[in-house]
Image (spheres, grey):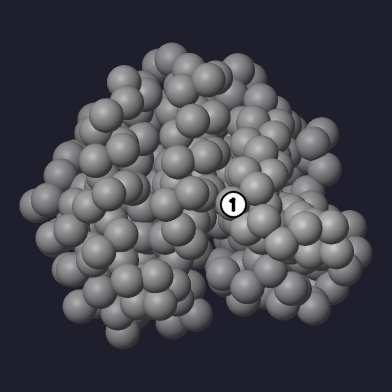
């Protein structure tokens, strides 16, 4: 069943929820299959950088049909829409996306507020939720091997700015910079759990961690118990797919068999990720839903 972020992340029974970006139907089906097997909600994401390449207007109706065919709550999320992609946001809403992330984190603070307010206003008309972002997250979204910055040099989100941003924009979820990054880590990320805990104590919307690939299991669980409610994961799915390509290419030319083996790897990885945090105790968010 299709849900938005408010419905997934703020109900009393929810723990943290995994958000997995996809490039095709096989990836989407893998997420739904794992969510059904584990009886836990899930989020299917499409990055704005992939929206046109994967022909989202043709792909999304099939994804939505799969979502509507399951009893498990699933959100369809547009990830990292840029301020200049307002037309894409409107198109995604018309297609049936239930969640939009507007990433104005590279803009000056007031401009980030302005564009986020506009996206919130239009998205709530569609009963869709909005994720905003304060504090730029290093690395290039949607590419599996771009994280070159040393994690200790990534600035953390300022808790006061986070509080002001949520109050001004009425967003439904907030992505924060806590030491993670998009892509593949080249050194251990320095996650600031105190920042997560402080921001969580100051605002009443779910917090989002981007760049979970390569973060240790213990660190992810620690982040969740300190206030993270949505975990974004993508690069790892690309990694295991390419590992399977390299392993299988020298053994067989059976493409169908290769696809089955690749989906098996996706199932294993998605299941492992969800099991990390699906039943962890989390902060109860008593927020009046806006959509």
In the rendered view, tell whether residue 154 sits above or below residue 39. below
Seen in the picture, residue 89 relative to 260 is either above or below; the reply is below
Residue at (63% x, 73% y) in the render: 143
Q: Is residue 116 left or right of residue 264?
A: left
Q: Residue furthest left?
A: 125
Image quadrant occupied by the C terminus? top left
- In front of the other: 170 or 145: 145
Q: Quadrant of residue 225?
A: top right
Q: Is residue 105 visible?
A: yes
* Quadrant that contains the N terminus: top left
In this view, which residue lies farthest toward the front?
253
Q: Is residue 67 left or right of residue 265?
A: left
Q: Is residue 107 or residue 30 the one in the foreground?
A: 30
Note whether residue 113 is visible: no
102 left or right, relative to 89? right
Q: Secondary structure at mark 1?
A: helix
How many numbered discs sit on the rendered protein? 1
- Farthest right residue in view: 187
What is the x, y in percent for residue 274?
61, 31
Label 1, residues with CA under 10 Å away: few <14, some 14-19, many ≥20:
few
Residue 200 locus on image (x, y percent): 54, 39
Residue at the image position 31 percent from the left and 38 percent from the top: 66
Taking the spot 12% from the left edge, 51% from the top edge, the residue there is 126
Circle 1 sits on which residue? 256
Residue at horizontal 9 percent and vertical 52 percent from the top:
125
**Quarter of the view holding residue 16:** top right
Horizontal and vertical percent for residue 74?
36, 35
Q: Position of residue 133 (x, y in %)?
A: 46, 62
């Amino acid at each position: 069943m299709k849900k938005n972020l408010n419905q997934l992340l703020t109900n009393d029974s929810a723990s943290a929820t995994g958000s997995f970006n996809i490039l095709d139907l096989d990836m989407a089906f893998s997420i739904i299959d794992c969510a059904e097997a584990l009886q836990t909600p899930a989020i299917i994401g499409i990055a704005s950088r992939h929206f046109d390449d994967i022909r989202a207007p043709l792909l999304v109706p099939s994804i939505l049909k799969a979502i509507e065919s399951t009893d498990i709550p699933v959100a369809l999320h547009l990830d990292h829409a840029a301020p200049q992609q307002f037309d894409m946001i409107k198109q995604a809403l018309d297609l049936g996306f239930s969640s939009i992330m507007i990433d104005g984190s590279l803009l000056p603070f007031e401009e980030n507020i302005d564009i986020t307010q506009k996206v919130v206003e239009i998205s709530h008309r569609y009963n869709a939720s909005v994720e905003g972002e304060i504090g730029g997250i290093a690395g290039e979204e949607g590419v599996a091997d771009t994280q070159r910055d040393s994690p200790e040099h990534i600035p953390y989100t300022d808790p006061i700015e986070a509080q002001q941003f949520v109050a001004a924009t009425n967003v439904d979820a907030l992505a924060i910079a806590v030491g993670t990054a998009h892509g593949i880590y080249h050194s251990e990320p320095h996650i600031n759990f105190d920042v997560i805990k402080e921001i969580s104590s100051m605002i009443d919307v779910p917090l989002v961690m981007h760049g979970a690939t390569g973060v240790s299991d213990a660190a992810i669980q620690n982040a969740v118990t300190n206030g993270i409610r949505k975990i974004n994961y993508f690069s790892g799915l690309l990694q295991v797919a390419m590992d399977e390509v390299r392993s299988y290419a020298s053994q067989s030319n059976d493409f169908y068999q290769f696809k089955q083996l690749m989906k098996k790897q996706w199932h294993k990885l998605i299941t492992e990720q969800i099991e990390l945090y699906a039943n962890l105790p989390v902060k109860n968010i008593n927020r009046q839903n806006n959509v």
